[in-house]
Image (tube, rainbow, N blue to C red):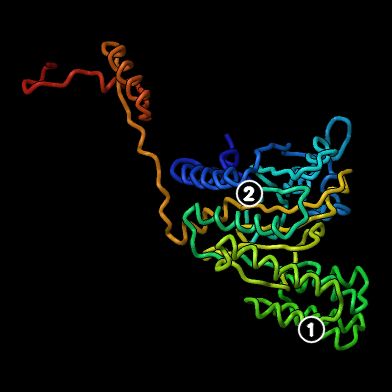
Amino acid sequence: MSKRLLHTPEGVRDLYGKEYERKLYVEKRLHEQLRLYGYEDIQTPTFEFFDVFSKEVGTTPSRELYKFFDKENNTLVLRPDFTPSIARFAAKYFCEEQVPLRFSYMGNTFNNNSNLQGKLKETTQMGAELIGEPSVEADGEMISLVIEALLSTGLNRFQVSIGQVEYFKGLCQEAGLDEETEYDLRDYISGKNYFAAQELLLERGVAEPYQGRLLRVADMFGNMCSLTEAREMVHNPRSIAAIECLEKLYDVLKAYGVAEYVSFDLGMLSKYNYYTGVIFKAYTYGVGEAVVKGGRYDRLLERFGKNAPAVGFCVVIDSIMEALSRQKVEIPLAEAVKTLYYDENDYQEKLAETRRLRNEKVAVALVRKQREEIVAPVGKDGKNE
């Protein structure tokens, strides 16, 4: 047998033993918080039609999708992201529903990214989506839920950075940027690549003072003072409305008692084009990327035939596990499995004891003795006793 059969492909791994038990514990704690906020569990397919994640939807680039064909020659993909799947689900089964919908989910996502940098290609995500509620109170509920969910796992050293897509879009509109330039600039600013952003603006002939204002967006992060500075820098109603939205959101988060965990970052933009308003990411020590990503996507469901605003987030379970490990946060584990051994002479007796212990919620493995264990002990005279 080839030794290659024993190995997993690059970017995926096996989980077992105590590590998997810890992961199950974290998933349980996160799920408890989702339930406390009234979110209903749903399950969507692991693979969908390609169009659910197409460029027009604004999700993962085609080159990063795992694509394959069914027998009817339809192009299918392993889901790289849950949000478009949830949007499709809501449009199919709740198209005429007018009351807010609260859904939660958990499953694996798949990204065929060759630039791994130690990242997994298959990750477990858990998240929540609130559909049909456009208010700032809904945004506050989501961010509060993120914070309380992270606290429930044992993490307490983290920060939720909050941005507003409309602020950047309003500034781009004020500067007269075309769609292509806005798209390229968003990538550079999101990656804090100041020099590439500056070169792009010079190349496209963007005039001052707009060039300077657009470049300053990358450095606009911090507390409420950063919002004051951001308001003073713009003169268009779209960006000003975005700042007012964040100010109201901060008041909601104070009412929830979680404002100490948040900061603002107007240079934070997402690779997903479907985000339309508030966006947020949670960061913690020991992990190089966000452990939670989320935001508002008020026009995504229109792609599937339902006109409804929505906001949601996903928690990357694998990143949470890495953070807990590096921060040396202890995760309580169940008691070790008790083992009872039997042979043909005492099977009934040991089975009865096993059933009694299991009724008392004690984990028991009933194991047949090996032949060498059954052999009678040898006496001092060298004969079997």
Residue 233 is labelled as: 1
Q: Residue drawn at (45%, 62%), measured in percent from left and top?
A: 327
- Which is more toward the observer, 213 or 188? 213
- Which is more toward the observer, 22 or 145? 145
> Which callout, 1 or 2, points at the residue further toward the start of the chain?
2
Is residue 233 in sight in this rendering? yes
Is residue 289 in sight in this rendering? no
Element under label 2? strand
Q: Quadrant of the N terminus?
A: top right
Question: Number of callouts in the render?
Answer: 2
Element under label 1? helix
Q: Residue drawn at (86%, 44%), measured in percent from left and top?
A: 306
Q: Quadrant of residue 162?
A: bottom right
- Looking at the rendered structure, the kind of residue marked 1 is Met
For this view, does 361 lie left or right of residue 155? left
Q: Residue drawn at (63%, 47%), measured in percent from left and top?
A: 126
What percent of the width, then of the height, locates residue 66? 76, 46
**Residue located beneath label 2 in the image:** 123
What percent of the width, then of the height, locates residue 227? 70, 77
What percent of the width, then of the height, locates residue 9? 64, 46
For this view, does 322 lie left or right of residue 371? right
Separation of marks 1 and 2 at Cα, in angstroms: 40 Å
- Looking at the rendered structure, the kind of residue marked 2 is Thr
